[in-house]
Amino acid sequence: MTPLASRMSPPGRAVASAAGGTKWSVLAVTTLGAFIANVDATIVVVGLPRIVGGLHASITAGLWTMTGYLLVSTVLLLPVGRFSDLFGRKRIYLIGFLVFALGSALCALAPSGGWLVGFRLLQGVGGAILASVATPIITEAFPPEELGRALGINSVAWVLGSVVGPVVGGALVSAFGWRSIFWVTVPFALAGALVGASVLPSSRARRAARQPVDWPGAATFTVALAALIVALSEGLAWGWTSARILGLFALTAAALIAFFVTETHRDRPLFHLGLFRHRHFAAAQGVVVSASVAFFATTFLLTFYLQGAIHETPLVTGLLLIPLSGPQMLTAPLGGRLADRLGSAGPIIGGLVVLGVGAFLLSLLGASLALVGLVVPLALISVGNGFYWPALVKATMQAAPAQVAGAAAGMFYTLRNVGFTLSLTLALLSAETSLPPAVATKIFLGVGHALSASAASALVHSVDGAFRLFVACYALALVVSLGLLRRVPAPSGTAPVGPAPAGPAPAGPATGGPRLDSRDA
């Protein structure tokens, strides 16, 4: 690490040394973790019909192989991030690789649909660790002036996983059966654990006796988030006014009240509400929720559109959706470099504008497919994601004190996944207005029959309406992102964590950051 980087790094931030491996080897290991976690999150979609048929499982059990993974990985993001602050990030991250490998192997051996769902929950535990702990590890390993570039490269792994997952999954299912889609990630996870043990730097673990775990906060948070996600996921199937769904929403509200009461009366809370007093951190969290709501269901809606209204096959549908991922592999490193050189606000704002334009163009899709009308907006959305996402992650991590970086990353990715769930719920509600739930499910799985002309027209109308709603979500994210333009001091207890954005400072008094004292470490 250069003397300049050493002076700029806040206390507790340890750039990887030769003994622990170079910063690029650290990035390679965390990028591998991101890649396999996202591959297994997407690869199941292709094999779902074969899984349901091979295990003689219900469609509900098949869908829960996807929903369960998202549920567990979301619920555990925040607690895992905090545990990594307390017990050492390297140790927790290596456990993540091993749990993911074990869960994948058990999924491949599952004797029934019920067992498969259970093993997917275990796999989701590993996925949560790999997602939550990687960002703090990268933040520790890289000096601030290179952090955006590193996060951009890491985000490419997520994009590549979403592209490779369906393609490789289709090939494996055809050649070796559905169990092969789980076996394929086991050796990569084991390799990640072995290599990570030698190259990841050891972070200082804080003694649990002096830094007790906030078990009441973890319990109430878990109950609230799990109840919410189940309610949003099953509302269409169970009925939004059914006793089960209303009960889950009531449980969510009660658990959230208990959670916030608990967190405001603890010296070392799981959820650092004080971080939201830092304008940049609060703005970044508002952006990630709004933009995630707008983006996540894009693939879901287009699957309905292409297979239900246009009558394309699942293979053609997958090929047509490639532009949604491809350009981002080029723009993500560029977006990260721009964040390093110009500050995070510019790439975030510019990326959100491009995303909004792309979503608006998708809201103009008609009953007949115009290839240019589909490919161009998908490419725009991919480009916009590449510019705004690495900069947004960097803005979040630089607004948080180093001693709670894991908790900050956990908050960020938890809110992102909540946005994902809300996005999928809005898409399901949109489909519900035009198709019966059973027909909608079959179309998504690629096993439904062609729709009548009137049903196809209604489906197109509902998809267009959903994308117009997503344009509004991008607009909201854009308004919130303007809060990142205002310069604020570094978080309390840290030194400045990066060069100031280029250009004159905005007029007006600076706003103080969150006051987290040593007890919060």
Image (cartoon, rainbow, N blue to C red):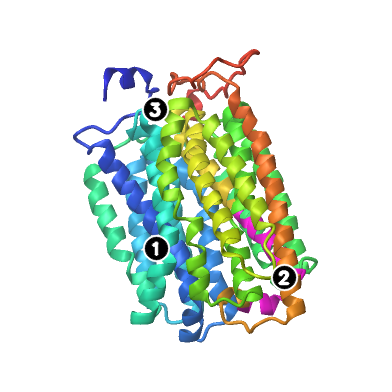
Q: Is residue 422 above or below residue 388?
A: below
Of 404 and 48, nearer the camera is 48
Q: CA distance from mark 3 to mark 1?
A: 31 Å
- Name the residue type under label 2: Leu
Q: Which mark is residue 144?
A: 3
Q: Position of residue 518 (x, y in %)?
A: 47, 24
- Disc marking residue 459: 2
Q: Which mark is residue 164?
A: 1
Label 3 packing within 10 angstroms: few (<14), some (14-19), many (20+):
many
Find numbered disc 2 in the image and state the secondary structure of the residue it sits on: helix
* Residue 28 position within the rendered picture, expressed as x and y whole percent measured from the top left: 29, 46
| Magenta residues (range) | 419-442
- The answer to whether residue 200 shows anywhere in this view is no
Q: Earlier in the sequence, mark 1 or mark 2?
A: 1
Taking the spot 55% from the left edge, 49% from the top edge, the residue there is 380
Q: Do callouts 3 and 2 mark residues in contact (Cβ within 8 Å)?
A: no
Residue 372 visible, this angle:
yes
Q: Residues within 10 Å of mark 2 (few under 14, many from 20)?
A: many
Q: Residues within 10 Å of mark 1 (few under 14, many from 20)?
A: some
Residue at 69% across, 58% down = 364
Task: Kindly give the residue lying farthest to the left in the view shown.
Answer: 19
Labels 3 and 2: the sequence-earlier one? 3
Give the mark nearer the N terminus: 3 vs 1: 3
The circle drawn on residue 76 is: none
